[in-house]
Amino acid sequence: MMIDKREFRNTLGRFATGITIVTTVEEDKVHGMTANAFLSVSLDPPLVLVSIDHKAKMHQLLPKTHMYGISILREDQEAVSQHFAGRPQENAPQFFWKENFPFIKNSIAQLACEIVDEHPAGDHTLYIGQVKWLSYEEEGNPLLFYAGKYRKLDLKGEAE
């Protein structure tokens, strides 16, 4: 049975995810992209994974830089997500630096990762990173993505 790409995407879109910005630095220039294909892999050692499309510029950068930062976006940062998804916004997102990694200012959580493994998988590559530094905010809600739209968590814990 052949799986239709659009139907596959629509089906997987029923899995709610957070929105992250993946950043790296090459020749003193910060590069970033929006990604929701991000997950934890291991607690010991602390490993995370980000899946990057082979057509994305980040796919060419990560094998050179051997590192990435993950900024988990706050519910009011939809414009930041749009900016790094190829729809530039008037006000460019602001960064802060920690451990030589750039992160999105006011994001709800951040992880600095050194790439320890990569696995080609279809039209993407899975980049596994060992977490070298992390931080998170106690308060605030994440920006969510569900069924092709940005969503917010309501205070009762239900998606709007």
Image: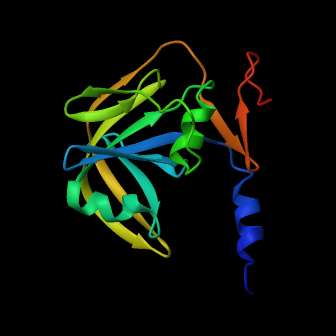
Q: Position of residue 64 (x, y in %)?
A: 21, 60
Residue at the limit of the structure toward the bottom, as seen here: 1
Above or below, 149 relative to 105: below
Q: State the scheme by which the image is colored.
A: rainbow
The residue that appears at 50% across and 74% down in the rendered structure is: 123
The residue that appears at 47% across and 47% down in the rendered structure is: 39
Above or below, 23 relative to 142: below
- In which quadrant is the N terminus drawn? bottom right
Nearest the eye: 61 or 70? 61
Total marks in image = 0
- In which quadrant is the C terminus drawn? top right
Left or right: 100 as drawn, with respect to 90:
left
The residue that appears at 54% across and 35% down in the rendered structure is: 80
Q: Position of residue 127 (x, y in %)?
A: 35, 58
Left or right: 60 as drawn, with respect to 160:
left
Q: Position of residue 122 (x, y in %)?
A: 49, 76
Left or right: 3 as drawn, with respect to 65:
right
Residue at the limit of the structure toward the front, as seen here: 90
Residue at the limit of the structure toward the right, as seen here: 160
Residue at the limit of the structure toward the top, as seen here: 139
Corner quadrant of residue 120:
bottom left
The residue that appears at 30% across and 49% down in the rendered structure is: 129
Q: Position of residue 156 (x, y in %)?
A: 76, 17
